[in-house]
Amino acid sequence: MKEFPLQLLLRHLYGLLLGAFLGILIGQFLWTLLFTTILMLVWHIYNLGRLAAWTGSHKKLDIPTSRGIWGQVFDDLYNRQQRHNQRKKTLSKTLKRFVKATAALPDGTVVLDDGGYIEWCNPSARQLLGLRWPKDGGQRLDNLIRHPNFLSFYERKSQNENDGVEIPSPVDTSKILFIQIVPYGNSRLLVIARDITLLKRLENMRRNFISNVSHELKTPLTVINGYLEILEAEIEPDSKASQPVTIMQRQTARMVSIVEDLITLSKLETGEQPENQTWINVCHLIEEVVSDAMQLSNGDHHIESHLDESVTLLANPQEIRSAFSNLVFNAVRYTQAGGRVDVNWERTEKGAQFKVSDNGPGIPTNHLPRLTERFYRVDVGRSRHKGGTGLGLAIVKHILIRHDAGLQIDSVVGEGSQFSCCFPVERVQFVQQEKND
Amino acid sequence: MKQSDVATHISQQFNEELEEIRHSVLSMGGLVEQQLADAVTALLSLNPELAELVIEKDTRINELELKIDEECTRILALRQPTASDLRLVIGVFRIITDLERMGDEAAKVARMGLDLSLMNASNKTYLEMENLTSHVIQMVNQSLDSFARMDAETALQTARIDKRVDREYEAITRQLITLMMEDPRNVRHFIDVIWAARAIERIGDHARNICEQVIYIVRGTDIRHSDIIYRDRS
């Protein structure tokens, strides 16, 4: 039960009254009152002393017990201590569990404080990044991991959580690490390093396999093609064998174009930056592509182009031509006869844009995200019939990535599709003189 | 030197300036490390594009040297540092010179790689170089680590690796001389290989200089041109 100060005061007053009453009884009023007061004081001082002894000692002493107000104080303290101990136990257990869990993480984890100094790191971080714990506590992480790519990534302070940087491990350069930086709490940073050596090796293997297979297939195909040409010349046009030979020829031609596309793709994948980049006059290039497209369309389509002469692009001309012609030819191939195809080259707020739009059948929305995958086809039979290899858009995507550009596809079923390549402003130059002259 | 060791000045800004200089030296070191690794890869895999990239990037190291040099001069003039701060600034002066030379040598290795790839040489003969280069790369990495941690003990151990690097260089030279005598038609490209090995060995020497500077900064004793590194094993 809680006692309020007033009740406490009353209790003491009762004691005093009792003493006074006794004093009146034996005729020594003042003396008895004094005695009672001293008795009370001694009791209080005694209990206060016990409390002081308990709080002052470092040993684990049991809390003293008593009666009355002091008993209550001691009981409360005891309960509080018990609760505290309990909480401490669960907290330290949780902490231990947490430390064990982070220590067991296969990814290297480093905690940095607001100045970029190392606060903590787990054993995998010590192994992957060559940190020493606890010796490196208080060191700047960017002093110990000095790879230029990491430093520029670290200074950029990207807010995107998926951003990361690949660097060789400082301990063992044959290992490749993928490092991510996640901000948390009050301007603290969590640095996560993952070993992706195996992943990289697999990726390399796949890439090499495709490129090797394509090269190996090329030679036999050339031989078959050669013999088919000889056969075609020797067989009489209306004999039984003439039709199979024509079909065989058509199919080998298709295989050759697939193999060539695969080789182009693997070339695009291996090189990081395209070579021979120059400022190219895109309009001239697009006009050539459009005239090729007109041949392909055979006059069945209405092709129109709107080109801004003043915009030039920093790029590799062969690659850009290949990307643009893939898009324009696709539009011609998949748009019914009599349809129209518009080709645009214009400046935009973010740079420049090449846009091909048609009024063909359109592409259902669920296919759009996967359209640039290799051999992904919306309608398998039709695409093959039109002579597509299934690699065109994959090539376009890779070329655009290499030129820091993006491919955007919009389509409405029944109304048509629109493919736009958006180039960033760093790659675009606006030539004004031609207009002024 | 931990954060607390450097941050012992009343002027907060001076602390930050010293810390910043240390960091710029180390990021310059990181660039040199990468240049070295790329140059060696270009040489061993005869990759002309990578070699050209390395040669091109050397100017960035030179620019950094000028920048740090200017910053150090400014600190000397404005702050008039004493004791360990003075040693740090002087050490940094010497370390960046060494780093810049290392960058030049790496560019030289890349140039040899470019020459060799244009000559269509087979890369069989320089597989022996891998051992040498891995030791030198390790030396450079550890010397910079010891500067970051201000760890004289590691610096001493790293400086000792230089002896081994010298021995490996000698072995490679001897082997190449034998190869030249066997097949005099290829003398020209063996000479290129020797030049590259020489440049890599020089990088090891510069890494050793950095270690000596770290010991100078931490302990205050100048151990250049003395065989003290190999003596006090006890």
Image (tube, grey):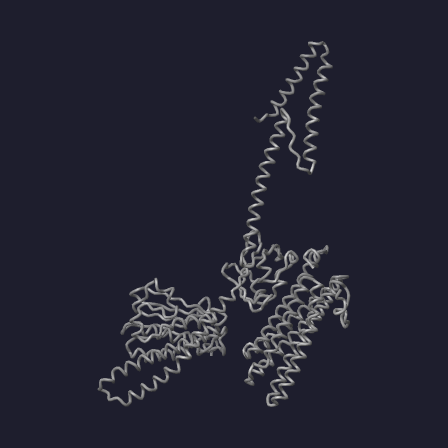
Q: Which residue is more in the foreground, A83 or B220?
A: A83
Q: Residue at x 65, y 76 (%)?
A: B200
Q: Which residue is more in the foreground, A81 or B89?
A: A81
Q: So how many labels did they put on this image?
A: 0
Above-or-below relation of A264 to A348? below
Q: Is residue B217 left or right of residue B189?
A: right
> What percent of the width, then of the height, locates residue B71?
69, 66
Q: Quadrant of residue A136?
A: bottom right
Above-or-below relation of A212 to A88? below
Q: Is residue B218 left or right of residue A431?
A: right
Q: Residue at x 31, y 67 (%)?
A: A362
> What percent of the width, then of the height, locates residue B213?
72, 67
Above-or-below relation of A399 to A367? below
The image quadrant where one finds the N terminus of chain A is top right
> What percent of the width, then of the height, locates residue B102?
66, 74
Above-or-below relation of A206 to A141? below
> What percent of the width, then of the height, locates residue B13?
69, 58
